[in-house]
Amino acid sequence: MSDASLGWTALSYLIAGIGFWGFIGWLADHWLRTGGIAIGIGCILGAAAGIYLTMRRLGA
Amino acid sequence: MSGQSSVLAGGIPWPPSVNDFYLPGYFYPWITKFTVMVWIAVALVLIFFLVSYRKPKLVPSKAQWMAESVYGFGRNGIAGDVIGPEGIRFAPYIVTLLSFVGVMNLFAIIPFFQISPSAHIGFPAALALISWVLYIYVGMRKHGPLRYLRLMTMPSGAPLWLMPILIPLEFLSNFIVRPFTLAVRLFANLFAGHFILLVFTLGGFVLLNSSTLAIKPISVVSWAMDIVLTFLELLVALLQAYVFAILNAVYLQTSLTEEH
């Protein structure tokens, strides 16, 4: 894989992670009325998952 | 606002509107200037390769040498390098993309055109859609639909309890974000390039029409920047065609590998 495409892979994991789990968090927030806390948890969880996938792909 | 339009009142059509894209006469609204440019690009690529390969010689003519260089670059430099020996069969597709997108992008700096069809999201989107269908089809042909989906969405070796979190991400990044970024990258580069050239051209006119005498000569600087940026656009046009082709090869490669 070329270096640039590795960079795009990392970016797409991070965007997808924060976007998808942030969205799930937003839904949960609407449903449970947590006042935004669920969105925060979703975003952080998604970012962690995105970083995990990036490290698995790009790390040794 | 009125001050602005009086500054620009030097015979420059302002503001530009959607109507600028249309051809006059009964072609409206079915055939736009972009449509014609795409036809020209298709014809140029087609005629160039047909003519230069018509009577191939062992000692190639200049045209044959150029066509062979482009094809060799796409075949060995992109398809062979990125995908591996299996990728040689995709060389025609990769080379077609490389040359077609390259010619389309070059319209961005050719006088009297000076906008590329790639600066219209519809054309990169259609190309990205074709690539999207192709790499999914190739992957399913090679592994079978279910196994392909498993390979593309389940990262091997990750702990099982993480899977519910990771599978949606792999799915999104492999099937949704990929074609989207492929199209937007090409579109945004050419669109921004067109804007930059427009800003410096019009900026020159604004400075020239300024009421302060001392400001008028600065318009020359603006137009000089225009020329410099046109060369930058040449670089961007060819580079983006290369990036588009190489990313297609990367996507095909990930469809074909056993695991990633």
Image (cartoon, coloured by chain):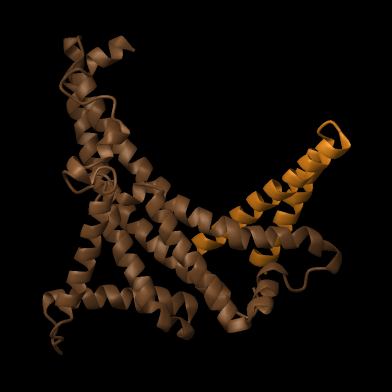
Chain colours: A orange, B brown
Vertical relation: A17 (above or below) B96: above
Can you give x and y, in whole percent of width and height, for residue B96 in the image? 32, 70
Can you give x and y, in whole percent of width and height, for residue B29 in the image? 28, 43
Can you give x and y, in whole percent of width and height, for residue B163 in the image? 80, 64
Q: State the residue in front, B2 or A54.
A: B2
Residue at (23, 19) in percent of width and height: B8
Q: Quadrant of residue A13?
A: bottom right
Q: Quadrant of the C terminus of chain A?
A: bottom right
Vertical relation: B245 (above or below) B190: below
- Left or right of residue B87, residue B196 in this image: left
Can you give x and y, in whole percent of width and height, for residue B25 in the image? 17, 41
Residue at (61, 63) in percent of width and height: B174
Residue at (51, 65) in percent of width and height: B132
**Residue B233 appears in the rendering:** yes
Please count the marks in the image: 0
Instruction: Farthest residue to the front: give it.
Output: B26
Vertical relation: B24 (above or below) B258: above
- Left or right of residue A30, residue A16 in this image: left
**Residue A1 appears in the rendering:** no
- Left or right of residue B228, residue A15 in this image: right
Q: State the residue in front, B33 or B228.
A: B33
Q: Quadrant of residue B238?
A: bottom left
Residue at (43, 67) in percent of width and height: B246
